Each structure stands twice: as structure tokens, then as C-alpha cells.
Image: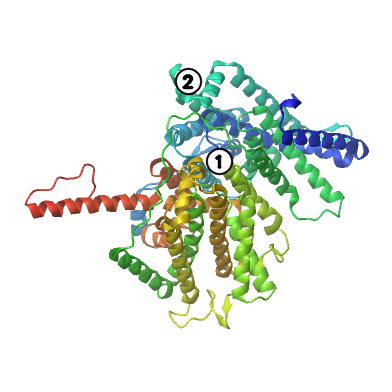
Amino acid sequence: MIARLSPVERIGTVALSALALAWIVAAIARRDIFFDPVLFGLGSGAIIAALAIGLVVAFRASGVINFGHGAIATYVTYVYVSLVGDGQYPVPPLPNPVAPIEGIAGIEIFDFPTFIDLGDSMGKAPALVIALATAAVLGLVAHFAVFRPLRYAPVLAKVIASVGIMLFLQAAVVLRFGARAKATEPIFPNEPVEILGTRVGQDRLWVLGTVVVITVALWVLFRYTRFGIATRAGAENERFTTLLGFNADFQAGVSWVMASVLAGLVGILVAPITGVTPNFFTVLLISSLGAALLGRMSSFVVAAAAGLMLGIVDQELFRLELEWSWIPDIGIRRALPFVVIALAMVARGESLPSRGALTVERLPEAYSPRITRGRLIGYGALIAVAFWLTVFAPFQYRGGMQNSMIGVILALSLVVVTGYVGQISLMQMALAGIGAFSVASFGTQAGMPLFVSLPLAVAAGVGFGLIAAIPSLRTRGASLAIVTLASGLAMGEIFFSRPGWFGLDRGVKTTDPPTLFGLEFGPNSDFFLGDGKIPTGGYGLVLLVVGALCCISVMRLRRSRLGEQMLAVRANERAAAAAGVNVAAIKLSAFAISSFFAALGGALIAFNLGTYGTNTFGIFASLTVLAFAYLGGISTVGGAITAGTLFSEGIGIVVTNEWVIDVGPYTAYVAGFFLIGTAVYNNEGIDGFQRRQFHQLGGWLGRRWRAARRGAAPREPEGADV
């Protein structure tokens, strides 16, 4: 058996064996440090393991890594807590079609219910049945409405759709239950028991036992039953399995129901122990993704064991940080597991096993318009409107324009790395945080001038981006998405959450307004144009100039030789390498350029806000940026501009709130819904849809004009909406 291992695997096996032996010796010597954390770590590790095996269930049948898995667990858990607490079943937030009329007339036409009252507090058993039935429905909807249409779509579309589910369900939880933590009565006995002198909650052991039983049951199901064998065969060769008479849709649908029910069950079982918040299971999902990755998204046993080990390692590091004061407090406890996962993926040099799909849809078109006189006039008009809104419009529109122009720069970072090269990056806001915290450290703390501090901050972002990009040389697709997400979380834990050069100062980070040659031009600085109210137009004009230059740079990149090589790598890495393209250099170049725009956007956010914290650059912010970039059009500059208008408190949201309907707390909910629809039905985003409509309209007008010259009636285009 050992002879079949590669040299790297042999070294790893020997190292792990030596570490295990050393741990046993240390546990005998210091049980309080090296044994007690194991018992406590098994509790949190069981949660990670349960979520991990749910991810494996969905992936084995459909090839989808569901980033919304934790959100499903959260929603189902809140349903259970609501039923047990007051007997109310939540109604999903639905759009009111007559809301604009109600707002204008000041009357209420329809009273949309938010809960269905089922009486007083419900018993645990019926509440559990209803909640798990809700989970099953969510699984069926996810399969038939979202991932079945994306069955042969690129990995990017599937990742985006799962992120949309996450945003949608988390927003639904906040809208219906609020953002406060919820708790419920225990399901398992919770009296403490003593194991070798250590007292631990009995309920944690029950959860661990439940996870072990579920893991064994799933292993038997997928290994020895007809359904499991057909599912495994379909993952290897779907065409051959279909010819044998197996229904791949049925297998995927059942697996999605199983995964969703398992997610909901895990949430319900651990809610009495840990409580639940809208983000609790989504944060744990990152560790679960790592455990599932170590099991190559196929082994329930390995994924469960890896999840348990992550929980144990977390508790071991926590105890060592308390006992050994010489260990620096740099956030290594939460960052180390993800660093280990990234190193393991790089060392193995393997991507995830892919399903034997029949066909693959094309990626979004990286459209590059020709610069004509008409387009120059259009660009000039757009800049003129932006100038007026930035300087002379009411203050809420000025603030919206500033937020939108920063959003455009952040979206451009994804256009380069994802739209042009096809590398899925979920760490863009972490890189933006590096730029923001760096410009504060170099400028405000060290007192460096702007023309020194800003380039140094951007260079720091590029450096971190290149380090995090190393796994892209060995991995791709969804596995790279997980590694970049973990890298972003590691940056936040090591730097943003604690004092230091790239961290906080007394709980927040403060950045002085930008000043160049004695001229201050921050958002609150005096400016000779406009009404003098904040935000003033000076900083907005700087953002307009910087944003326009960034857009021009990305457009020129698309038409350059480097841009052509990027598109070649995106289309087929092997073919590009055979044609003489240095794939590794192209990927690193893309990540460097993308990191440049992300860090620049982060520095501009720092100047715009003045005072900010860690949540501004957290993992959920990175997912939101990706969502809006894809919704606008992730492969074009026009899509980045559209995405900028959709960003939180951007000009598009401001105009919608002022003139159409106050979206308010429904912003994330609506964004998640439209993100799912875009991933399923229009992978080129709003920009691609508008471009097709203009081309169709232009073609119809051209045919009409030519027919009029010939004196004949034009033929109406089939399906055209004019």
C-alpha cells in the first residue's frame, strides 16, 4: 500500500504519524492541554462534518458546490425555532405588485401576510417534521428551478447561482426574523458527563453520534444500493448511465432533497447548543467546504473525519494560545486550517472530479466594441451626466455616484480575472481591505504623502493577490473558488480583526482625507462648485477621472495581445499552452492586474468612509461584489459600469428608492433573486441583454430602411420586441 503512494504522500504520511505519536505522548504528560480540547473540538467538528457530508451528497449527484448550503440550514432552523416558540410559520417575502400605487396614494390595497399562525407554541416533533418538509421543498426548488437548467453550464454559472441562493435565503431570514440570535429548548439531554476527568455536555456527544450514524448510512447507501451505484456511475459517465436506463434527473433531485434535509437537521440539532444567527452556518460552511475538499467531494468518511479534525485543531490552538503566552496573537487559530487546505490542494495538484457531462455551454462573451464616432458621443454624454450628478445633483445622488464609481473599479477587478481568464476569485474585498488598511497605515499613521502612500497600498494589495494566486497554477474552477474564499478569510482574521500595521486602531481604522500638494479633496472637503453640502463634488470628480481611466485601461487590455492570450487561456488551457502561451504567467498577470484594481478600490473606500471596520471587507462583501459584477456582466467593461450602479447605496439604488419604490431592506433579497435568474437564463448579465436588444433593434431598423428604399413592406423579425 505504501509503495503506491507518491513521494509527497509518503512524506505526508510519515509526518502525520510522527505528529500523532507526539500528540499521544504530550496528552499523557499534559491532559488539560492536549486531551481536553479534543472532547470540546468534537462538538464543533461534528457540525462542520455534518455540513461537509451534505455538500458531498449534492456534489456527487449534480456536480454543484452549493455555497448556499449553510443558508438552507439557517432558514430551516429559523422555521423550526419559530414553530416551537410561537407556532408561526414564515411566509417567504413576496413582491407586492401594487406597492408603487400604495406609496403614491397613501392607502393599503393588499395586506400581505408575513406569518401563518398555527396556534400556540408547537411540539418539537411536529415542528421538526414541518421544518424538514420545508427543507425538502427548498431542495426540490433548488434542483428543478436553478441547477437543473444549469446542468451543462460552466462552473462559474453554478457558483454564482449558489451564491444567489445564499444571499436570497439569508436576506429572507433577516426580513422575517431579524438579525438577532435565536435559541430554543434542547432536543438531546444536555446534562454534563465526565470522561477521563473532563466534563463535557452530553448533547454534544449525541450530535457526534448522529453525525457518525448519518455518515455510515450515506456510505452504505451510495456504495451498495442501486440508487447509489447509479449516482456514482452518472458522475463518471452520464451518457453511458442514461443509456443503461437510469434517470439522472431523478438521482440529482433525490440527492438535493437529501442534502437540504441534512442541512436543516444539522441546524435544528445544534441550535439549542450554539444558538443561531443569519450568518452562523454560512461562516461554518467555509470550514465544511475545506473538509469536503479534502475528501475530494466524493468520500463521506474522509469529509466527516476532516471536519472533526478541523474542530479539534481549532480547540487545540485556542487552548495553546491561552496557555503559551509566547505564541503571537495573529489570528492563526482560524486561519491555519484554510492555509493547510490551500497547501494540500497545491501539493496534490488536482482539481475536483467533474461529472461526465454531455455538453458544456459557452462562457459569457468578452465583448469589445469598436470605437466609433457614435460611441464616442455616447461616452461623452455619459461622462457629462456623471459630472452633473457628481457636482450639482442633491447630496444623496452625489453620494450614490461616489459609491457607484468605486463599485465600477471593484467590478473591473473581476472582469479581468474572471471575465477574461475564467478564474473564479472570491477574495476581492479582502484585497480591497489590504489597500484600505495599508493606505491608512502608510498615510495617516506614518505620515507619508499621497503619491507615496497610495502606490504602496496598491502594491501591498498586488503582493497579497499574487501570493493567494499561487493555487491557481494547480487548481481551477470551483476548487479555486473555495481556496480564494479561504484566503480572503485568512487575510481578514490575521490582519483586519486585530491591531497592527494592516489592522485596527482602537476597534476601527481611520483614514485622513487625501491631500496632494497641500490641496485637500476628500468627500467632506471644501469645493468651489456645487452647493457646499457633503459629500462635496471634489472627491467625486477624482473618482470619475480614476474610474474612467480604469475603464479605458481594461478596454485596451481586452484588445491587446495579453488580452487575447487571457481569452485563449479561458477557452482552453491545454490548447493555449500548445500554441505557445505561458499559462502560468497569464494567470499570475491576471491576478496581479485584478489585485491592482481591487486594492485601488479599497483605498478609495477608505478615503470615502474615513472610519471603517472589518465588516466592510469581509467574506460576505466579497460574495456580494461577485454577485453584482455577474449581474451587470462579468466579462465586459459595460457590465462593470452597470454593476457599479447596482452596488449598495449606488446611484441605481438611490434612483430606485427615490423615484420607483423604496427597496430598503429588500436590496439583498432582490439582488439574490435576480442573480439566480441571471445565472440560469442570461449568463452575460444586464449588459449582454441590453446589447442584444440594441443589435436586434438596429437590425430591424436597418431592414425597415432598406425595404422603404425599395418600396416594399419590411418583414417583422421573429420574436422581436420593438
Residue 197, quarter of the rendered image: top right
Where does residue 394 sit, x and y in percent of width and height? 42, 72
Given the image, on which type of amino acid does mark 2 rest?
Thr
In the rendered image, residue 43, in percent from the top left (x then y), is placed at 74, 36
Residue in the foreground of this view, choosing between 123 and 454: 454
* Vertical placement of residue 212 versus 383, above or below: above
- Please state the total of marks drawn on the protein image: 2
> Is residue 67 at all visible to an observer of this figure?
no
Is residue 687 in sight in this rendering?
A: yes
Label disc, if present, on residue 241 of the rendered structure: 2
Residue positioned most to the right: 29
Question: Looking at the picture, which amino acid does disc 1 mark?
Answer: Ala
| Residue name at image x 61 percent, y 60 percent | 461
Residue 85: x, y in percent?
A: 61, 39
Q: Is residue 22 left or right of residue 711?
A: right
**Looking at the rendered structure, which numbered label has been put on residue 478?**
1
Q: Quadrant of the N terminus?
A: top right
Mark 1 neighbour class, 10 Å CA radius: few under 14, some 14 to 19, many 20 or more: many
Horizontal and vertical percent position of residue 494: 71, 55
- Vertical position of residue 476 compared to residue 234: above or below: below
Mark closer to the chain start, 2 or 1? 2
Q: CA distance from mark 2 to mark 1?
A: 24 Å
Q: Decide which of 430, 250 is in the foreground and name it.
A: 430
Asked whether the residues under the numbered discs 2 and 1 touch, taking CB atoms below 8 Å apart as contact, a structural biologist would say no
**What is the secondary structure assignment of the residue under circle 2?**
helix
* Color theme of the render: rainbow
Q: Under tag 1, what secondary structure?
A: helix
